[in-house]
Structures are given as C-alpha cells and as structure tokens.
Amino acid sequence: MAHDTDSPGSRFGPRVWLAPSIVVTIVMAVLAAMYLGGMVSSSDDIDDFPIAIVNADAGVTNPAGQHVNVGGQIVDSLHKNVDGDVFDLRTLSLAEAKAEMGQARIYGAIVLPSDLSRKLAALSTEAMSDGAVARPEITVYTNQLASASIVTSFSDQALARANQTVGEQLITDATSPQATDTSRDRSLSGAAHLILSDPMNIQVTPFQSVPDGTGNGMSAMYYALLLVLAGFTGSLIASNFVDARLGFIPTEMGPIYRLEDNSGHSRLATLTMKWALMAGLAVVVSTVYLGVAAWSGMPLEHPWTLWMLSVLAITAVAVVVQSILALLGGLGMVVNLFLFIVLSVPSSGGTTPLEATPSFLRFLASFEPMHQIYLGTRSVLYFGATWDSGLGRAVIASVAALGLGIIVGCIGTRSYDRKGLLRRHTPATVQA
C-alpha cells in the first residue's frame, strides 16, 4: 500500500525544515565568530608586527672625551625591552625604511635624528638659562595606507620609556659635581626639571598623506570586495539563468513557474559555457567598476592595470565558484559562501593588519582569495602598482586559482559525464 505523500505531515515534517535550520545556524554562527572575533582583536593577537628603527644620530663627544650616541642607546633599549615575537623591529637606514613603507612591507618607522645626542647634551645648559630651549625631535612615520594605527600606540609607549630614561640621565648629569661650577647651586628650578624630564619631542606624521577620494585608505578593501562579489554573486546569478534556459531547473518569476525541455547538454559543456559567460562578464563588470570609480572621484593613477587585474580576479573567482557548483550541486553554494565570504572577508587584512589579528585569520589569509586580491588593489591604488608591493602576489594567486579551477572542473565534470550521471529529473519511487 502506498503512503499518502500529500498529507500535511509528510510535506512539512522534519525532512523539510531540519536540514536548512542546521545549515543556516552553523553558517551564521561561523559568520559571527569570524567577523566579531576578527574585529574585537586585542594586543595579545599582535604577532611580528613590522616597524623600522632608523638611527641617524651622529653622536657627540662629552666633556670627559667620551663619544656618546644616545640614538644607539635608545635602539639597544628598544630591542632589549620589546618582545620580538610581538613586534618585528628592523634597524634600517632612512632610505631603506622609506622603500619598505613604499612597498607596504612595514607599517611605520621611528627616526632618530642626526643631532639627537648633540641637542640633548646642550639641553642641560639651555634648561638652566633664560634663553630659548631646543628639544631634539624624534619623527614617527606611520604608513596610513597600510592600516598602521598600531604604530602610533607602540611609539607612544616605547618612546615614553625612552624619554623618561634619557630625562633621568640628563637630570643626574646636570646636578652632578662634575657638570656644575662649585659656585653654582646644583639644584634645578622647577622649569628646568620639567624640561629635562621630558627632553625629546615626539612628532607623529604620515609617511604619505591619504589622498582624497580613497575613503581614508579604505577604497582598496572595498574595491577588492567588489571584485570578489562580482565573481561569487555573479556566478550564482548566471548559473541559475543558464540552468533554467537549458531545462535543468525551473524558471520562477512571481506566480509563473516554467520548466524548459531538458537540453541534454553534458556537465562539462554546461560548465564551459558558464566559464565563457563569466569571462565575458568580467570584462564588462571591470569596465563598469572603473567607470563608477572615476565618476565617484577615486584617484586612478594606473587605470589599465586596475582594469586588467579586475578582469583576472573576477574570472578566477568565477571559475572556482562555477567548478564547485558543478561538482557539489546545491552543497556547492554553501561551500562557496564559506570560501569567498564567511572566511574570506575577515582574513583580508583590509580593515586590520593581519599581524594584529588572531593566528587563525593569518592562516586563512595565506590562501583565501580576498586577501590576495586586496593586496593587488592596494598596490595599484596606493603604492604605484609595483610588483613587490602586492600586485605580483595578486596576479600569481589569481592565475593559480584560475588554472586549478579549470583543471578540477574539467576532470570532475568529465568523470560525471562518463559515468552517465546526467542532469535529468528522476521521479522518486514510492515503495508500497
């Protein structure tokens, strides 16, 4: 006897609602953990954060005939007191530091000037006189376009300790018998003590100003997100339209429900058709993006490079998305959602430097597409489109993803076709 398949219980039982409920809950839980966990980062998450130390101090010879280099002492103190696993302090020349910041390899630089020791030596005398006081200035460069607010907080803390140490030494030297006349009172006035206790002026300045029209340095991240969405969302839309026209799924528009005759196309032929469609759309969408960017006032110094990178990135994402859909079917949509949205955006490094995010996100960034594409768009928009500033990595990663997607997609769908696993509707058999 056949079961009544039209009863309300069979139509709306656990088989209908249980699976989507579980999947949606899991996806949203992971989404919350990734986005909130990546945003609410703490100092405990910082790992190998690269900052340059530039010691240009020429030193000075003190009255005892000894050569003193306060800059060298500060550098040694920083290397000794700063946790090397947290901050990667690189002792560089000023030219090297600027080159590294220009390629987004470091987030900032602390520059100790050439006259640091000389001005500090003269400060004791100046502080106790009625004349003007010239404090030496330490410059902290921040790489604003590489998300470097952490540099400011680090320099505030590290240089505050250095200022205190140098100040204590100056006060000691200024009041010692060897540094004063026997006829002079060795005690310091309140003003002199105040000056010597804070002897160095710390000046924080951007390495390069953030151009207008970049959303305070966020335009590269949003442009990269647009490229990923074009490949991901565009593929989902195109796939549904193509499958509907080929008779593999029904077309629904409002109350209209229609199923075309099955075209009989093989899985490989259908996948190839979708790839070709998305490659053409990558050209169109990249052109539209570039036009909208120009219309909105974004500075575009390398428009053709950005356009070519966009075409390549969209095509690579689309090829991988379509291959996963072709091999996994409906489950492929969930896999793609995780790969290109849930796990990809938090690990992009576009809002927070990866060195200041949990280790899991840094691991994801090694292969997740959003990070690679972000490095490329950031290079083109902010760092002169040089190969070493991120463009090379974006191109290589996109080409690798494109090739891998084509190979896996062709082998997988060809295997399905050979086994006779055609995309045809097979009515369910109801057992008596």
Image: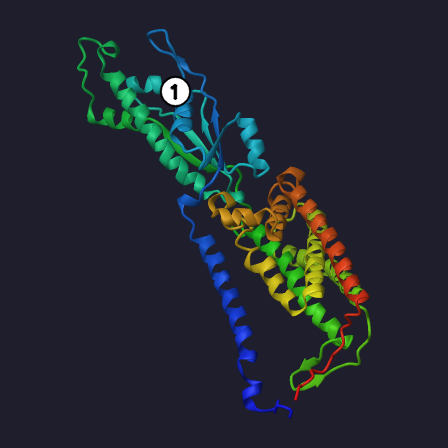
Quadrant in which the N terminus appears:
bottom right
302, 47: nearer the viewer: 47
370, 2: nearer the viewer: 2
Question: Dividing the picture into quarters, in which one does residue 117 lie?
Answer: top left
- Vertical position of residue 246 compared to residue 281: above or below: below
Residue 130 seen in the figure: no
In the drawing, does residue 10 fall left or right of residue 193?
right
Residue 140 seen in the figure: yes
Percent from the top left, x then y, of residue 200? 35, 27
- Vertical position of residue 136 compared to residue 174: above or below: below
Q: Residue at x 49, y 46 (%)?
A: 359
Identify the secondary structure beneath mark 1: helix
The residue that disc 1 covers is 70
In the drawing, does residue 144 fall left or right of residue 237?
left
Q: Residue at x 54, y 50 (%)?
A: 350
Which residue is at the far top?
Answer: 65
Percent from the top left, x then y, of residue 270? 78, 67
Q: Residue at x 55, y 47 (%)?
A: 363
Question: Dividing the picture into quarters, in which one does residue 5 lie?
Answer: bottom right
In the drawing, does residue 369 fall left or right of residue 196?
right
Three-letter amino acid code of the residue under disc 1: Val
Percent from the top left, x then y, of residue 383? 61, 41
Q: Residue at x 61, y 62 (%)?
A: 335
Quadrant in which the C terminus appears:
bottom right
